[in-house]
Image (tube, rainbow, N blue to C red):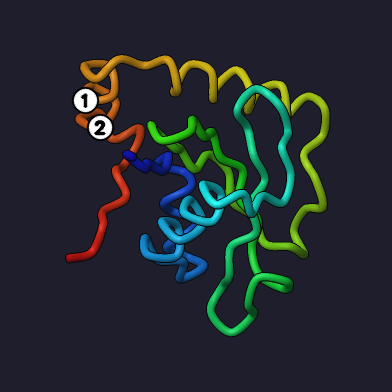
Amino acid sequence: MRVFKTKTFAKWARKEAITDKVLLNAVLEIENGLVDAKLGGHVFKKRIPAPGRGKRGGARSILAYQTQNKAFFIVGYSKNEKINLDYHDLNIAKEFAKELLNASSSEITKLLKEGIIIEVRYET
């Protein structure tokens, strides 16, 4: 399983002090069936804990997820910033998810080199 975050998501996560370990744990929870919302088109909403706020008061993420294959954190926001994606934003997320999940290995390598996505690293 490869896990990625968009450049925009990475910037937001850094500001919120959300680590790669937290993101990997969120993907593991999804693999175990713990999903906050299935939004269709392989797009999921997942609560992620923010330091000092936990999950309930913490952050929300929108990610593209393909079972046992790839996951891409696309959007992140604090609970108090936004309640839900509107119809237009959800459709954009679904289209972006489709492109990312259908990307070949060489296309992913290109996105990584261009800095559009960043691979979430497992700690050793």
Q: How far apart are marks 2 and 1 (CA)?
A: 5 Å
Residue beneath disc 2: 112
* Image coordinates for residue 73, horizontal then vertical, percent: 49, 43
Image quadrant holding the N terminus, namely top left
Q: Which of 63 and 16 is in front in this view?
A: 63
User: Could you say whether the residue bearing mark 2 is in a helix, strand or loop?
Assistant: helix
Q: CB under 8 Å between callouts 2 and 1?
A: yes
Which image quadrant for residue 22? Answer: bottom left
Q: Residue placed at 58% from the left, 84% from the top?
A: 52
Amino acid at circle 1: Thr
> How many neighbours does mark 2 have within 10 angstroms: few (below 14), some (14-19), or many (20 or more)?
some
Q: Residue placed at 25% from the left, 32% from the top?
A: 112
* Image coordinates for residue 97, horizontal then vertical, percent: 54, 25
Placement of 106 over or under 25, stated as above or below:
above
Image quadrant holding the C terminus, namely bottom left
Amino acid at circle 2: Leu
Which image quadrant for residue 70? Answer: top left
> How many neighbours does mark 1 have within 10 angstroms: few (below 14), some (14-19), or many (20 or more)?
few
Which image quadrant for residue 6? Answer: top left
Q: Which mark is residue 59?
A: none
Residue beneath disc 1: 109
* Image coordinates for residue 89, horizontal then vertical, percent: 72, 30
